[in-house]
Image: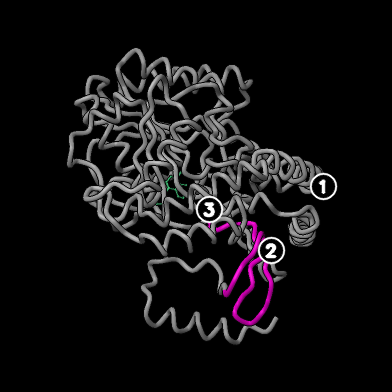
Amino acid sequence: MDKQRSAALVERRKNVVPNGISLNFDATAAHAKGALLVDMDGNEYIDFVGGIGVNNSGHCPAPVIEAIVEQSNKLIHGCFQVVTYEPYVALAEKLAIMFPHGDATKVMITGSGAESVENAIKIARQATKRRAVLCYTGAFHGRTNLTMALTSKIAYKKGCGPFAPEVYRIQYPNYYRYGDGLSPEQFADREIARLREAMLNVVNEENLAAIIIELVQGEGGFYVAPQRYVEELRKLCDEKGICLIFDEVQTGFGRTSKWGAYQHYGVVPDISTWAKSLGAGMPIGCVIGKAHVMDAAAPGTIGGTYPGNPVACAAALANLKYMEDIDINGKAAHVASIIWRRFTDLQRRCPAIGDVRGLGAMIAFELVEDKNPRKPAADLTSRLVKACYDRGLLILKAGTHANIIRVLSPLVIDDALLNRGLDIIEEEMLRLTA
Ligand SMILES: Cc1ncc(COP(=O)(O)O)c(C=O)c1O
């Protein structure tokens, strides 16, 4: 691959952009469509990253482009605290219908996932008049100061403290790593006991405003919370007057083959947080919640200059309609069936793959040594990512130990391209472990 122009741009980047923004690949992107990215030298990449879970509906979907152009000709910015404009209200109405949180639902539009989480906590604190927040090991909730405090992995926060206070953490119900030979039922029992015990030895329940959980951990490595655990979380929060927050930033909008991961569980949170694939790449997110909880935030305590920008709202509305029209959840189920079959088949031939797991099309495999869930094979994982990249496939690792390969490809990817990407993973995996 000739990469001269890309190399020159990356060099310019290094001169002027701080190193703290990590550089996973030396790839550039000149343009993209569907699940194919083209760099400045004309090289094509199969995209199994989707801008980290943002491009469920593919790169540059035509209806979203049209909506952006049309809205830009009318109103680019208004500031929703100053003037009310239709795209914001229409998007809130649409999201409230798609994701009812009880009898009455209200929606706040934000500009990112971290902003959604940050505001969810501000709202929960005002609704409960309490301060503490309970979160999980392996969690990723963003990079602002409060959301960094909620985020677990030290590599993301080293040297960045002091962090927001009143954040407490317990172990995520991660069956693969901490199953200890228990059956899934016994494991759920043990983790539920751990959760209830946390009210005695981790945080005072009378001061607990919220428990925030990813039903499928994203950056954490696609661990799926057990059904009974989530039901118990709901019960505990109801008993103790705690706000239950589901962070759906990475799981949302078709990724798990439903609009939200919580719809697999039949458990409704008090508040949920969203972003990523809502806007097809436009910076937009939202907080959805029970109306009485959302309204507990006093006027002036939430908002901002840009959140709910009219162009981003129009893009999100067009994107939601497009995803409905093409049945994004059906597409995810189809993509999932292919990836699942290919990964479980590869696992049978490759002992380094300790686990294949996920929900819908949010599928990952974990690389370990000696079939031991506590012996992560991080080096092998890095070599696999690099080998795939060298063959034109973009794929990311995940997990506290960086030993998990996850697929976040656009869900509109066609079978041929998907299988070409999966062929590359399979061939490189077998080559590296031969
Ligand atoms: C579950 C989850 N919450 C929050 C965030 C933060 O979102 P953003 O990067 O848009 O601030 C992420 C980002 O990866 C995420 O996966």
As drawn, 417 above or below 404: below
Kind of residue sitting beneath label 1? Arg
- Residue at point 32% right, 37% down? 120
Element type at mark 2 = strand
**Residues at marks 3 and 2 touching, judged by CB atoms closer than 8 Å:** no
Q: Residues within 10 Å of mark 3 (few under 14, many from 20)?
A: many
Does the beta carbon of the residue at mark 3 sit less than 8 Å from ligand 1? Answer: no
Q: Quadrant of the C terminus?
A: bottom right
Kind of residue sitting beneath label 2? Ile
Tell me if I can see residue 127 in this picture.
yes
Residue 38 point in image, percent of width and height:
64, 72
Q: How many marks?
A: 3
Q: Which residue is mark 1?
A: 349
Q: Out of 406 and 186, give the one closest to the viewer.
A: 406
Task: Identify the image quadrant of residue 133.
Answer: top left
Q: Which residue is mark 2?
A: 46
Kind of residue sitting beneath label 3? Val
Does the beta carbon of the residue at mark 2 sit less than 8 Å from ligand 1? Answer: no
Residues under labels 2 and 1: Cα distance? 24 Å
